[in-house]
């Protein structure tokens, strides 16, 4: 754009772009820190365990909501620190669990 036109538009409308915030100052949604289950069998409520190493890229982890319903994080991604995207929703119709979670002691890297 021509410099004179840019100056004129800036004079008329003012500067309309808000100042950018540094990444550290942005509000981040709190996440539930879910402990890892190291035992065998079903995952207890509000715990998780990793899927088999051959399927971890596809299924990530098994998770259990506070009501004990099993959830496989198939349609999610997991950051290196265990942060799950998007939020986790229990598929059980009678359950209202829906939250943002972080899998404690996640060691499989980003998947």
Image (cartoon, rainbow, N blue to C red):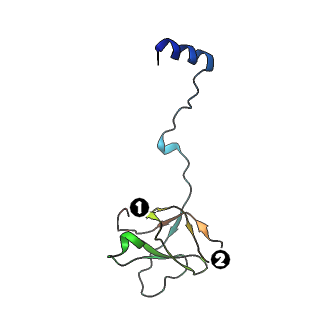
In this picture, residue 16 sits left or right of residue 34: right
Q: Position of residue 43 (x, y in %)?
A: 49, 82
Residue at the spot of label 2: 93
Residue at the spot of label 1: 81
Residue 77, relative to residue 13: is it above or below?
A: below
The quadrant where residue 16 appears: top right
Q: Quadrant of the C terminus?
A: bottom left
Measure how far apart labels 2 and 1 are at the Cα level: 30 Å
Q: Position of residue 30 (x, y in %)?
A: 56, 58
User: What is the secondary structure assignment of the residue under circle 1?
Assistant: loop
Residue sitting at x 40%, y 68%: 106
- The furthest residue to the bottom: 41
The quadrant where residue 8 appears: top right
Residue sitting at x 51%, y 17%: 6
Q: Position of residue 47 (x, y in %)?
A: 50, 76
- Compare residues 5 and 92 and report the one nearer the observer: 5
Q: Position of residue 55 (x, y in %)?
A: 36, 75
Residue sitting at x 41%, y 61%: 81
User: What is the secondary structure assignment of the residue under circle 2?
Assistant: loop
């Amino acid at each position: 754009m021509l410099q004179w036109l840019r100056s004129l538009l800036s004079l008329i409308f003012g500067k309309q772009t808000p100042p950018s915030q540094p990444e550290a100052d942005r509000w981040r949604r709190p996440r539930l820190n879910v402990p890892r289950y190291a035992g065998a069998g079903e995952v207890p409520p509000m715990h998780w365990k990793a899927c088999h190493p051959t399927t971890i890229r596809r299924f990530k982890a098994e998770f259990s909501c506070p009501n004990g319903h099993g959830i496989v994080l198939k349609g999610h991604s997991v950051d290196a620190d265990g942060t799950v995207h998007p939020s986790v929703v229990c598929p059980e119709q009678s359950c209202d669990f829906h939250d943002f979670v972080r899998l404690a002691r996640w060691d499989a890297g980003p998947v």
